[in-house]
Amino acid sequence: MNFPNEIFLNIYFFVGPKTFYLNKDFFKFYGMLKQEFLKNPLKINYRLIRWKKRIYNGHDYRPSLCIDKTFRNIDFKGNFFIGNIESQNNIKWSKNFEDLIIPSSQFQYSTSVHYKGFVVYWTVYQVKLNDSLERFILYNNLWKDF
């Protein structure tokens, strides 16, 4: 019995790569779906929060924050799990995604008699989907960790 590739795709979303044993034609269809993301990558916009914390003689002070006014863009061509949809076009991002987009922390110190300085670090504020919701779900299911 020969089923359409869309049925095997739904089975793949639950079972994973073991689905390739059921039908050889599905593997070609699966490769075609992945090629679509190589040609036209998934586009995501995000904003970060910059935190600046003052340190003086071992005492930490309340950090100040600055939210990016403009969205930054990133394209995904594959092999990376982004996260899940939280609400309409908002993404609950994964830890790997957070590690990818957040710059490393910096420590700026002063050369005065007392030990003082600033720690600058970043957190994710908002992640929005720039493509369609169906495309994001397909991308996540194709590169899901099983």
Image (cartoon, rainbow, N blue to C red):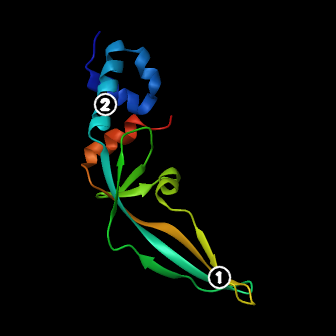
**Mark 1 burial class by Cα count in 10 Å: few <14, some 14-19, many 20+:** some
Q: Quadrant of residue 38?
A: top left
Image height check: is 87 above or below 7?
below
The answer for how far apart the CA atoms under marks 1 and 2 are is 49 Å
Amino acid on which the number 1 mark rests in the picture: Gly
Residue 142 percent across, percent down from the top left: 38, 35
**Mark 2 burial class by Cα count in 10 Å: few <14, some 14-19, many 20+:** some
Question: What residue does disc 2 label?
Answer: 35
Q: Looking at this view, name the residue that lies furthest to the bottom.
A: 113
| Residue drawn at (35%, 40%) of the image | 139
Image height check: is 77 above or below 69?
above
Label 1 SS = strand
Front one among 137 and 100: 100
| Residue drawn at (33%, 54%) of the image | 44
| Residue drawn at (59%, 81%) of the image | 53
Residue 37 percent across, percent down from the top left: 31, 37
Of marks 1 and 2, the one in the foreground = 1
In the rendered view of the protein, which quadrant contains the N terminus?
top left
Image height check: is 86 above or below 78?
below
Question: What residue does disc 1 label?
Answer: 117
Q: Quadrant of residue 52?
A: bottom right
